[in-house]
């Protein structure tokens, strides 16, 4: 890829998130991504293999000349390299995916899967958005957020402070 090529990495984690897969593999999404200079869409689709394959078939059948390379897979032992090579991460609201993305200081849009029964993940995403570290979204407003590029002005996530644990341990041990 040329230096000015840009990649979006999408992760849905270990569950399925058909709505986000179908939305991002659509003509509307491709138009927005192309207008923003993105040339590659790298998707970890988890249990949404069927939705991924259906969306890809629709795009092939409609002969969309999107000029966006699409790569998809279900799982890998680590998503770190894909995250590192991306210019924008769109993630489900799993705390592990969020933390890994934030530590890489990549623009991050977190999309909560409202189809899951326990929506505690939304609380984490909203709190981190309030602190300016990420942009919180639902599938209904994701394309508008992409267009607005509000994810380009996020606050870098602070580095972990290993001394906090050591200080607590020392205090408890009376050292």
Image: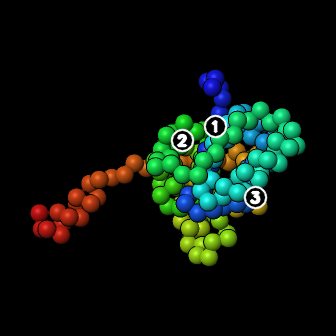
Quadrant in which the N terminus appears: top right
Residue 51 seen in render: yes
Q: Which mark is residue 7?
A: 1
The label nearer to you, 3 versus 1, is: 1
Disc 2/disc 1 C-alpha distance (Å): 9 Å
* Residue where numbered disc 3 is placed: 141
Q: Is residue 174 left or right of residue 118?
A: left
Q: Nearer the viewer, mark 3 or mark 2?
A: 2
Q: Is residue 59 above or below residue 168?
A: above
Earlier sequence position, callout 3 versus callout 1: 1
Q: How many marks?
A: 3
What's the distance in space between the residues labelled 3 and 2, CA to CA? 25 Å
- Helix, strand or loop at label 2? It is helix
Where's residue 13, x and y in %? 56, 58
Q: In the rendered image of this protein, does residue 93 appear above or below residue 36?
A: below
Q: What is the C-alpha distance between the residues marked 3 and 1?
A: 21 Å
Q: Measuring 80% from the left and 36% from the top, which residue is drawn there?
A: 66
Residue located 54% across and 36% down the image:
85
Label whose residue precedes the other's in the sequence (3 or 2): 2
């Amino acid at each position: 890829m040329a230096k000015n090529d840009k990649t979006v990495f999408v992760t849905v984690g270990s569950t399925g998130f058909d709505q986000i897969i179908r939305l991002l593999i659509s003509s509307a999404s491709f138009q927005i991504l192309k207008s923003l200079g993105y040339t590659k869409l790298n998707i970890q689709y988890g249990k949404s293999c069927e939705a991924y394959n259906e969306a890809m078939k629709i795009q092939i059948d409609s002969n969309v000349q999107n000029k966006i390379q699409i790569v998809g897979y279900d799982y890998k032992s680590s998503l770190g390299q894909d995250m590192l090579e991306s210019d924008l991460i769109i993630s489900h609201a799993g705390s592990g995916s969020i933390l890994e993305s934030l530590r890489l200081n990549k623009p991050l849009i977190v999309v909560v899967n409202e189809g899951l029964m326990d929506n505690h993940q939304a609380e984490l995403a909203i709190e981190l958005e309030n602190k300016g570290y990420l942009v919180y979204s639902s599938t209904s407003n994701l394309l508008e957020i992409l267009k607005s590029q509000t994810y380009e002005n996020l606050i870098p996530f602070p580095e972990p402070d290993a001394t906090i644990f050591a200080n607590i341990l020392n205090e408890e041990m009376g050292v």
